[in-house]
Image (cartoon, rainbow, N blue to C red):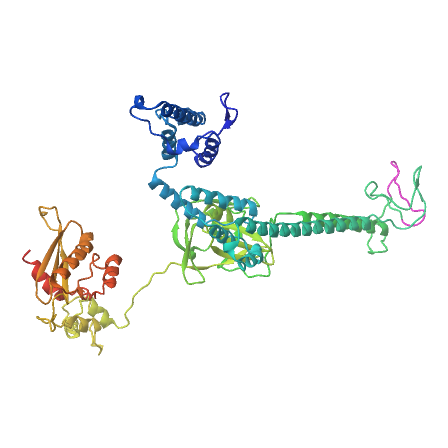
Amino acid sequence: MTNNGMFPFQTPRLTKDNYENWCLRMKALLGAQDAWEITHKGYESPQNEASLSRQEKEALTKTRMKDQHALTLIHQCLDDSMFAKVANANTAKEAWEILQNSLQGVDKVKKVRLQVLRGEFETLRIKESESISDYYSRVMTIVNQMKRYGEIIEDVRVIEKILRSLTPKFDYVVCVIESKDLDSMTIENVMGDLQAQEDKLNRRQEESIEQALKAKVFLKNSREEKNQKGRGRGRGQGYGQRGCGRSDREDRTSSRNRGRGRFNYHRPNEKKHDKSNIECYNCQKFGHFSWEGQNESRNEERVNLIEDQQDIEEPTLLLALKNEEKNDASTWYLDNGASNHMCGDKEAFVELDEKVKGNVSFGDSSKVQIQGKGTILISLKDGSHSLITEVYYVPKLRSNILSLGQLLEKGYEIHMKDCCLWLRDQYGNLVAKVSLSKNRMFMLNLKTIGAKCLKASVENEAWCWQMRFGHLNFGALKMLGEKEMVNGIPTISHPNQLCEVCLLGKHARSSFPKEATSRATEPLQLIHTDICGPIKPLSFGKSRYFLLFIDDHSRKTWVYFLKQKSEAFVAFKNFKALIEKESGYEIKSLRYDRGGEFTSNEFNAFCEANGICRPLTVPRSPQQMALQNEKIGPF
């Protein structure tokens, strides 16, 4: 927004990206200044101002001042680059139309942009982490843009779009809303119900998290209290001090109070006793007292507590061991730590570029070599096939890996919740739903299809030689072998079977009758038509084709010259209107070949609407077009 000394208000700044919002703000601003009507409609300046009356001159002066005021407001909203476009505009209407055409586009551009917005509106879907209010803002932004381009969108259409694009957690409230009359509901009412459901779900989630945290803190405190309890009471005699029956384990781990009067404290210069001959009463091992062994076990228990707490707070799974489940070639692990898809089975690739080399590093700093990069073909549940591209071939890899990062780069959407992983493609279609395994891994079973090379084999060698010699008869083949007329051919015996190809090749096609067995009994009962071209040289009217209409009853012929084949439909409508008025009859049947100019949807719809039968000729049978060919010859 800009503020100038000329106006006591701020004017919105126009850029090449905010024309839609700027247009709405300027309409409100010009309307408040009583200048929008003059900007929108403009005014006509009279040619002869001298002939105007005094009142008309005063009205014209006020109109011009109002127009200049509106033009000044528009100028104050523009920077130097935008001002150059309207520098030559003399009126506010002219400046407004220049900005509208340059930033919003003409009608053709508006239609293209509206088409793009329609596609975005249909593909809108709420994201898993997106709130209802944010998704509503996205939807209404596109809806408002479509309305500015002239699209008429009712509230019920927006409501239906929002309801069918929500996540499954809103299914209950969606069913309740759909049971009502959507035509009588407003968008604000629907959004209120959805936001109430969202708040309820968020509160439940916060309560469950709070309860889990309380349970964790209680578990931790109870374990610490249990491990801090002392054993026994009494006085312990130390070196120059008295000890109570409870010792601090964290400050004096080497000290221990057991019952009355036991408090050990080693003097700095005191020699240690030889414990090699001392037997423990608990574990019956030599080298320590019984209370020392129990102290070590309690220290070990405290260490286990710390490790247990760390396991609870650990957010990332670094390694998992899979013993109970069988790993085979069809198992693929979904891994977010892998940079690329990898496979160790060379037979699974349908395409493999072995020129690609490199190394793959693992978490233990070990490296294995990449021996190629290719494509793997998999079979889906519905029987269709799909490709996994850009897969590294790593021979030493025992498990197949699908990289989640590589899938994200290709536009796939990944969502994990309730021990399940949902994988959707870039269009929002569900590709796979994978459950968490016992060892906390996401495994996907994919049936790979290897490259196959099919071979045709012939059991009887006689048939093989018969096909090699172009289906020569077996008697001649036998003679070639017996008389050694061909090197390498064996003696062939007749297999006592007939060759289907030879029988089919010897069949002769039945001849077509030279004359038709039936003929039309009245004019226009049957019309033959055909198109010929392109012809060279062109006609005087620059036509490249000519169209024939032949009456089967009278054999009278009409000729229409065409520049394009697409004009055949218009020519037929003109011919139909002309001939039916002249003869008083109506066209009942139209026979033509299977050319595209006669089989278009427009042509078929016209014939059906007028009750015209359309018998088509048999494919690759020019004999049925003998009448048309006979007429085309002289032309």
Q: Is 115 positioned to the left or the right of 515 in the image?
A: right
Vertical position of residue 315 compared to residue 7: above or below: below
Q: Quadrant of the C terminus?
A: bottom left
Question: Could you say where residue 83 lies in the image, as x and y percent from the top left?
Answer: 40, 25
Q: What segment is highlighted magenta in the picture?
A: 258-272
| 51 sits left or right of 616 in the view | right
Visible in this render: residue 399? no
| Residue 553 vs residue 317, the one in the foreground | 553
Question: What secondary structure do most residues of the magenta stretch adopt?
Answer: loop
Q: Report x, y in % for residue 148.
A: 42, 41
* 313 and 292: which is toward the camera: 313
Name the residue furthest left.
Answer: 634
456 displayed left or right of 535 = right
Query: Does residue 260 show up magenta in the picture?
Result: yes
Q: Position of residue 8 (x, y in %)?
A: 52, 24
- Which image quarter: residue 504? bottom left
Q: Is residue 395 above or below residue 254?
A: below
Q: Nearer the viewer, residue 320 or 220?
A: 220
Residue sitting at 20 percent across and 65 percent down? 614
491 is within the stretch colored magenta: no
Answer with left or right where residue 290 lies relative to residue 595: right
* Residue 558 visible from this viewpoint: yes
